[in-house]
Image: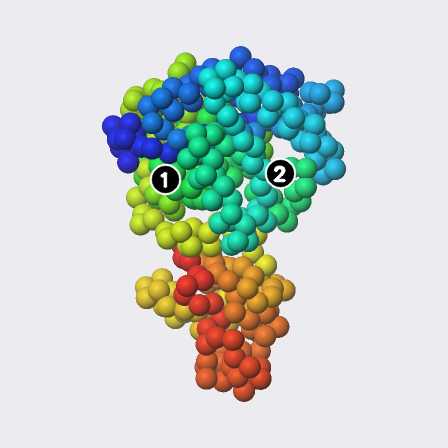
Amino acid sequence: MERSKLSQSKRWVIKIGSALLTNDGQGLNLPALQKWVKQMVALRDQGIEVVIVSSGSVAEGMQRLGWQTRPSALHELQAAAAVGQMGLVQAYESEFAKYDIHTAQILMTHDDLSSRKRYLNIKSTVQTLLSYGVIPVINENDTVVTDEICFGDNDTLAALTANLIGADVLVIMTDQQGLYDDNPRENPNAKLISQAQVSRKDIEEMASPTGGALGKGGMYTKVMAAKRAARSGTATLIASGREPDVLPRLLSGEDLGTLLVPDLEPLTARQQWLAGHLQAKGKVILDDGAVQVLKNSGKSLLPIGVKAVDGDFQRGEMVVCVDERGAEIARGLANYSAVESQKIIGKPSQQIESILGFIADESIIHRDNLVLTK
């Protein structure tokens, strides 16, 4: 998608980070939020459906609880999120109410999107809300999240949301102007990249691996979010939320921030769901022949092409397929547990039943439940 075609888009996911939403940890930046709400209403008036992915609950909770630094203990983070979520939702609801627009809060964990049934339920809910003119405000459910089921940052959550609803555009608003060819906080001569194809290898190297004191992300997570969003053909704009009228200006095609253009064939809805599984239960190591078969023919993964199994997964759980050098090739849902898989790897499919005493499938991972990630 070129900038000139952004005005033709119909559905935007807009992610707003903690660095923008808060006053250096001292509560929500309400004047700034009011401006963004006004801009989002302007998008709506031009026929754009808007979904918000909002950070800020932990930072708002810290302010309400009088904490000066972000805690590291999980139970304290959860407490801060629980307190702060009240202020965050109140702020959005009261501002959009000025324009007679309803909002809806949706809290998710990665566990919700890992379940195919819950994934489809969330998708249906968001689409229904949009059909009624409601603006969903999505955030990670920090009050119950653990390391095993978290997204890690709201950039990733925003990208998976874009996949979920088939958004045309993902806007990641940050405190930087966009993606630079070097870290602008360290190199004053760093140059802003106006546009790049999302498959470019060097854009990951350009992105800073660390974020600010309040946020968990950084430019690297934003680039990786753009790559994830591209799975559904979504273009990503990384731009400064401090620019006046940044959203309407982006819609008009103005050269602001960085546009990362999806240049690969979009995945099917089921493949997007499979690729969105961030937490794998194990991995299978493939020989070079199996790697080529998966990459070039789109066939199922047979046990004869698997050299080793790692992890403790059960049937139906997500596993990662890697080559002999450890590089990820694909991921999918296992037809056999780790114990069962260990017994049949390297063997022809015709021997599965004689080895295990039953046969669930001729493959370790069926092609319908497998997606290439490289």
Report how far apart the C-alphas of labels 2 and 1 lie in the structure: 24 Å
Residue drawn at the location 34% of the way across and 27% of the way down: 47
Is residue 285 in view from this perspective? yes
Task: Residue 160 in the image: state x and y as whole percent.
Answer: 47, 43
Please tell me whether residue 169 is drawn above or below residue 29 in the rendered image. Answer: below
Residue drawn at the location 46% of the way across and 17% of the way down: 99
> Which is more toward the observer, 21 or 239?
21
Is residue 181 in view from this perspective? no
Q: Quadrant of the N terminus?
A: top left
Q: Is residue 143 left or right of residue 140?
A: right
Find disc 1 in the rendering and name its residue.
234
Find disc 2 in the rendering and name its residue.
141
Numbered disc total = 2
Please tell me whether residue 318 is drawn above or below residue 152 in the rendered image. Answer: below
Task: Residue 267 in the image: state x and y as whole percent.
Answer: 37, 51
Residue drawn at the location 52% of the way across and 66% of the way down: 334
Task: Give the mark toward the camera: 2 or 1.
Answer: 2
> Which is more toward the observer, 345 or 91?
91
Q: Quadrant of the C terminus?
A: bottom left
Q: Secondary structure at mark 1?
A: loop
> Which is more toward the observer, 203 or 105?
105
Task: Residue 369 in the image: state x and y as whole percent.
Answer: 45, 62
Q: Is residue 319 left or right of residue 256?
A: right
Q: Amino acid at mark 1?
A: Thr
Q: Amino acid at mark 2?
A: Asn
Q: Earlier in the sequence, mark 2 or mark 1?
A: 2
Q: How is the image coloured?
A: rainbow
Residue drawn at the location 51% of the way across and 59% of the way down: 320
Looking at the image, the residue that sits furthest to the bottom is 354
